[in-house]
Image (cartoon, coloured by chain):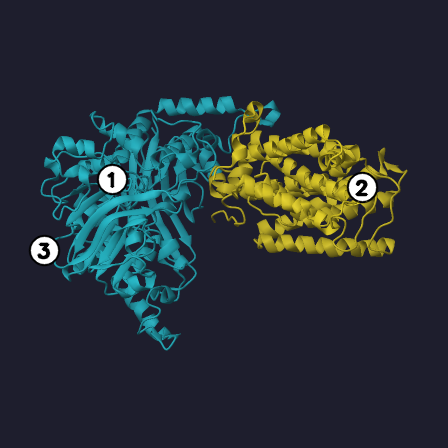
Amino acid sequence: MRNPLADVPVPLLDDLIDDEYVRSLVVGVVGTLGLLGLFGLLFPGSVAGDLAGIVFSTSTAASTARLAAPIVLAGLGGIFAEKSGVINIGLEGLLIISAFASVYVASVVGIGNAVLGIPAIWIGFMAGIAASTLLAGVFGVVCIEFKADQIIAGLAVWLIALGLAPFMSTVFFGGVNTPNLGANVGWRYSAVMVVVATVASWWALNRTAFGKHLEASGENPKALDTVGVSVSRVRYAGVLLSGVLSGVGGSALALSIGQFVGSGETMVQGKGFIAIVAYLFGNYNPLGTLGAGVLFAGLDAIQIRLQQLGYAVPDTLVQTIPYVVVIVVLALVGRTRLPAAAGDHYETEE
Amino acid sequence: MNPAVHLDGITKRFPGVVANDDVDLEIERGSVHALLGENGAGKTTLMNVLYGLYRPTEGTVVVDGEPRSFASPRDAIDAGIGMIHQHFMLVDPMTVWENVVLGNEPRTWGGLRVDEATAREAVVELSERYGFDVDPDARIADVSVGVQQRVEILKALYRGADVLIMDEPTAVLTPQEVEELYDVFEELTDQGKTIIFISHKLGEALSAADEITVLRDGVKVGTVASADVTREELAEMMVGREVLMEPATTPREPGERVLEVTDLHVEDDRGVEAVSGISFELREGEVLGIAGVDGNGQSQLAEAITGMREPASGSVDYFGEPMAGVSRREHIDRGMAFVPEDRHERGLVMSYDLVQNGILGSQHDPPFASGGRIDWNASTEHAESVIEAYDVRPPNPDADAEDFSGGNQQKFIVGREFERDPDLVVAAHPTRGVDIGSTEFLHDRLLELRAEGKAVLLVSSKLDEVQGLSDRLAVIHEGEFSGVVDPATVTEEEIGLLMAGETLDDETVSGAAIHDAVDDGLDGSGADGADGTGDPDDAGGSDRETATDEEVGA
């Protein structure tokens, strides 16, 4: 069946997005929000009114930005890795490690201090990026150099971070949760970073030579190799970028609260896995990933607010809203296509 | 003037194998040079040395009078050498121009942006200069194989190649496309480019090359001018003994009807109709050849007949019994042998050794199975006998299938299927990738089967093969038979036209359709015939133009 959202006429979009799939995603999200706003304005007292009130409030925007940052940024990172041919399902681990490292380093430097004129909290932020990039680098070496199975190596990255971060927290702070730093990075920073990273990623993938090399590396690495571009270097670049971007996401997540929470599934709580869904959902297009990430995060934020509103609906049911919507949207927009050589090792001849 | 390329005493050893032994080669600028030899003769290895993929164990590569040492293809490219591999190195979802400039993109904005306009312009300019008709914005996935090949040539030219190495360039082309490729050769050499192409086909070396170098077992047998040599002499140089060029078919009275296919429609994996109403019958002791460009429904036809694919409509009767709903296993048990088109996907389990591969399809049957267990001794003996009879090299039944070269894998599959003692053999490209010595043997085996009264359905894109072996020759185009002809009287050009979906005048096909259970277009008068398969272009005389625009699309 042809997806009906692809045919909704929106002239401007056609110049910007040539991908039918992403286009329908954007049309769907914007359309839903628009309808909701319209009903909210028309019937302020109804459920739609309540919903619109929640959706269009600043506090929802703030928590959406906070929740979306790790999803979108890790998702963007995942695009770079997977486009190059390395499926990185360790994004969750990268988020965890950067969330912890950022809080740890910020607290070591001490809030109120600065290094080279940079306030402690931003030093922590950079440390988070560095930690995530380092771990991604290890993952890259294992997968590209030693040809380990990418899925297993990715799971290892997650499990290592899941164990290591709370353990280090216990060693340094005496508990799996770190104390609160008493300072944080405002949600507007997160929002700006998300938007800038999305636009930059889109440009890198679609307009630069590097983007073409990434695509070739994931689709037909041999074609790239025979024209003299090193496939491993392109793949390392893709994997390291997934580390950098996930690092930004993890640091933003932890520092927006000023604390690392290491109990249970840690404060990352599966956002790295949702990031994978987000970029698949966005069909490897950063704009689509942004849309998908904001959709998930927004629904999550709304869902939390809805619980507080006290409708006579069980909370557990309300919590499923984001996932139900995901399934509905997925059914509407159709399917994605993996890069042809994703998951395959590449060996140059001789 | 220096020769464009001079390979001086090249030896390349791999662990346990000498792939090239002291090979000397001089190639004149502006000439077309064919490198001819059987599978495993070391042609591709030699060219990989020239292209910097391999480093020679001994010897030097001299390009334009200057000794060179290439660490990687990049160095070779810088020295003006381009290689077009047998399997095209193109990125399917990307456009033609993106593929051409890949790795050498012109950039603006301080490197932050690929200069699309410049890139496209360069591609268009090159394309026009050499008379290629290529749309720079088409996606590779959407263009024909012939066009993809031209994109590969453009890629090399864009990188400043003066010497173009082409590995088996005609393997995937229609006869008309091959002609066009020869024209491209001419255009390129006129403008000072040098072409080296690898081939194991005599005819192609003779018609396209100025000079031919023959390699055998890694050693150079000699270099000859194509004008001074005959097919027979070349074949002898390649194989090292005299080769019977034409398989000897003797006319035979066909026996009982083995297979009857009636108005068969088959869909491919995407649900698109690939076979659109084919009918024919096949008798004992008869070979029906099916010629056509790959991807015109022959795979689906073969699969439908052998029970690998459920037809959408129509019927397949085998010894008078309808085969609809009959399992694949039952097909095998009733004596249908199948040499599949894709040897990796369907013919072999690549990680199994030849013993295990040798009993595929017979694993339930004695002598290989007894009481639910497999008799490995009997299986090993069987594998060994196939290896010996079909000259599979190296003769090691314990080696995994993936360790054999393509030609040897193919010989093993054909051997396994032919030795099943079948009543019907459906063979899709049985000699694809097999050298002429072994091809000759496989052809002889096939004719022996025919003499034993087996029915053979032979699908092939090699015209000389289908023409030489078949009693009747059907040409398939877009899922229909565009004609059934008598292989003894039809010309290659006529087959080429049918392959491109055109129809022939009635006279040309006279004496052809022996059992004439064929599609419409042909049984009426000449004029009706032309209308029957309705090709809007076939009124004009520009056969070749139509041929390329029409074909492939696979």
Residue at image mark 1: B204
**Mark 1 nearby-residue class (10 Å; few <14, some 14–19, many ≥20):** some
Q: Is residue B365 above or below residue B64?
A: below
**Mark 2 nearby-residue class (10 Å; few <14, some 14–19, many ≥20):** many
Say which chain tag 3 marks: B
Residue at image mark 2: A255
Which quarter of the rendering shows the C terminus of chain B?
Answer: top left
Q: Of tags 1 and 3, which is closer to the observer?
A: 3
Which element type, helix, strand or loop, lies under badge 3? Answer: loop
Which quarter of the rendering shows the N terminus of chain B?
Answer: top left
B281 vs A265, left or right, is left
Where does residue A29 sit, x and y in percent of width and height?
A: 63, 34
The three-letter amino acid code for the residue at tag 3 is Arg
Say which chain tag 2 marks: A
B513 vs B425, left or right, is left
Q: Are marks 1 and 3 in contact (CB under 8 Å)?
A: no
How far apart are the alpha carbons under marks 1 and 3?
32 Å
| Camera sees residue A135 | no
Q: Do the residues at discs 2 and 1 belong to one chain? A: no
**Mark 3 nearby-residue class (10 Å; few <14, some 14–19, many ≥20):** few
The hue of chain B in the figure is cyan
Where does residue B316 sit, x and y in percent of width and height?
A: 25, 54
Residue found at x 64% / y 54%: A155
Residue at image mark 3: B252
The tag earlier along the polypeptide, 1 or 3, is 1
Q: Could you say which chain is coloured yellow in the image?
A: A
B267 and A66: which one is in front? B267
